[in-house]
Image (spheres, grey):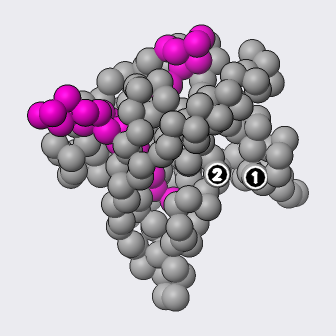
Amino acid sequence: MLITKVSDILSVEDKGPTRSGGVHLSSILNAVGLKMGFIRTSKAGKDAAANDITRNNYFETGFTVERMLELALGDRVGIRPGEIIYDGIACTPDGILFSPDGSVTVVEIKCTWMSVRDPALIWKWMAQIMGYCYVLATHDADLHVLWINGDYKPPKPVYAQYHIVFSTQELTENWRMVLNNKGLVA
């Protein structure tokens, strides 16, 4: 038997909607998060190339699991709208639900190796979802999370769905922060 390793890089073909070359909400939030210390930078260590491969594999695994969850959740995700440009900022929510009464709910799907915690404590997630809500003129969002290792006691997958209702003030202040920091990546 001959086994040859062909690749150590996971590459997902379908990562969702094609992104334009403009300024993306996630890029602004990454820049703000790094600036404010809400997001930590990873240490390159001795072998930066190996770390790049590992980081890539984490991201690609997340994309894969998010797509699988999207398929599994079916109608609970609504429609995938593609890229929405608002105030010159590209936003790509995972889904939008339309209720019979005409109300709109933003749907976001996350796959993470972080331990289970209150999603309100994850600044980037909340800022991203608030951005999508602002752009779609709604206060409501459903967040589906697959916590890959649960609480690590012992490590086991935990799935949770959260319904979030933001105030008008939260949405307005968050979007103002996004606009004020657009120049960090523009």
Residue indicated by mark 1: 38
Q: CA distance from mark 2 to mark 1?
A: 7 Å
Q: Is 83 left or right of 116, judged from the image as shown? A: left
Which residue occupies the foreground of this view, 169 or 106?
A: 169
Residue neighbourhood size for the residue with mark 1, other residues' Cα within 10 Å, grouped as few (<14), some (14–19), many (≥20): some
Tell me whether the residue at label 2 lies in contact with that at label 1, contact meaning CB atoms closer than 8 angstroms.
yes
- Up the image or down, 95 lies above or below 55; here it is above
- Residue 2 visible somewhere in the drawing: no
Q: Position of residue 22 (x, y in %)?
A: 61, 13
| 124 over 185 or under it: above or below | below
Amino acid type, mark 1: Phe
Query: Residue at image x 43%, y 19%?
Result: 83
Give the residue displayed 41% in from the left and 26% down from the top.
137
Amino acid at circle 2: Trp
| Residue shown at the point (76%, 37%) measured from the top left | 32
Give the quadrant of the N terminus.
Answer: bottom left
Which residues, given as a range, are shown in magenta? 85-112
Which labelled disc corresponds to residue 123? Answer: 2
- Earlier along the polypeptide chain: callout 2 or callout 1? 1
Q: Where, quadrant-wise, is the C terminus in this rendering?
A: top right
Answer few, some or many: residues within 10 Å of disc 2's Cα (few below 14, many 20 plus, some between 14 and 19): few
Report if residue 13 lies within the magenta region: no
Q: Is any atom of residue 119 visible in this view?
A: yes
Q: Is residue 165 left or right of residue 122?
A: left
**Measuring 76% from the left and 35% from the top, which residue is drawn there?**
31
